[in-house]
Image (tube, rainbow, N blue to C red):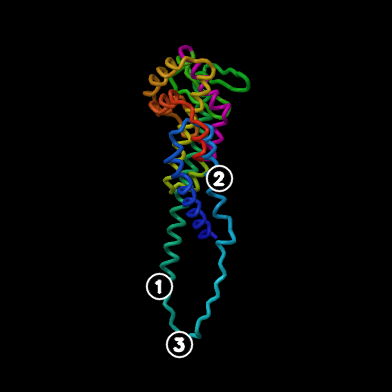
Amino acid sequence: MMEAYLVYMAQTSLCLAVLYLPFRLWLRKEACFHTNRYVLLGMTLLSFILPLLRFPWMIQETILRLPEITIVGKQVNTIESHSSISWTIIAICLYLSGSICLLIRRICEWISIKRFMSRGCIWITEENGIQIYCHAHPVTSFSWMNQIVISEEDYQRNGHAILLHEKGHIQCRHTWDMIWISCIQIVQWFNPFVWMLSNDIQDIHEYEADLSVLRQGVDAKNYQRLIIRKAVSSGSYAFANSFNHSLTKKRITMMKKEKSSPWMRSKV
């Protein structure tokens, strides 16, 4: 049973690689953020579905007629059999160890986020169903589900732009994307394309949130200066959507880039 699961994971990894590489070459730098986001999420789902499908042209019935063979002797060489079993057990143990370690790490990170929100918080307010936690000490602003964490200094100086950015993450439901990608990372931690795809998803999240800020009338140049100032701050949690996500140059480039034409979207 476990051997079949490992084979299925290998097949899904191959499918994801075949689907992801064209995106990396043709679509990654296009300014159609919503399309790219759904393309990436769609290919992760498709990579798990394709190995389960059995098309008629894949099924071939072959009849082999072999001559009769008489086997004489009672001794059977089982060295190769034992070797095969031992390697299978090693592969299963390695796979489970990686998945369990990553699962524990993600659970600890989620618990840490929940604890961090209320620890050191000086006040909490709610705006349109979104809870805002303001901290007295400097913290990196980030959002998780329908909750935003921001420092008092950021709230007083740049609160409007930062909150619009984090609200953009919440309105687009980016946290659910990260939970889904984290689940894929747990079962396919050995697949480098999963981690590359995860980075692309986070980048697209920032592009979408930046776009939502500019659509609210925030001056583009002032907002870009704010991004540059905040780029030197420390990062946040892998689960959370952080305002200081370190892709400053790409974010500014995407803000200046013209929206991709419908012809560009045909690359999908």
**SS under mark 1:** helix
Q: First in sequence: mark 3 or mark 2?
A: 2
Q: Which residue is drawn at 52% across and 38% down?
A: 266
Which residue is identified by label 2? 45
Q: Is residue 159 above or below residue 107?
A: above
User: Residue 216, percent across and down?
Assistant: 54, 17
In-image side of 25 versus 126 (left or right)? left
Front tag of 3 and 2: 2
Instruction: Inspect the image, locate mark 3, and give the three-letter code of the amino acid beneath it.
Output: Val
Spatial CA distance of label 1 from label 2 is: 41 Å
Instruction: Inspect the image, locate mark 1, and give the three-letter code of the amino acid beneath it.
Output: Ile
The residue stretch that appears in magenta: 156-181
- Which mark is on residue 72? 3
Q: Is residue 243 above or below residue 61?
A: above
Instruction: Inspect the image, locate mark 2, and give the three-letter code of the amino acid beneath it.
Output: Leu
Which residue is identified by label 1? 79
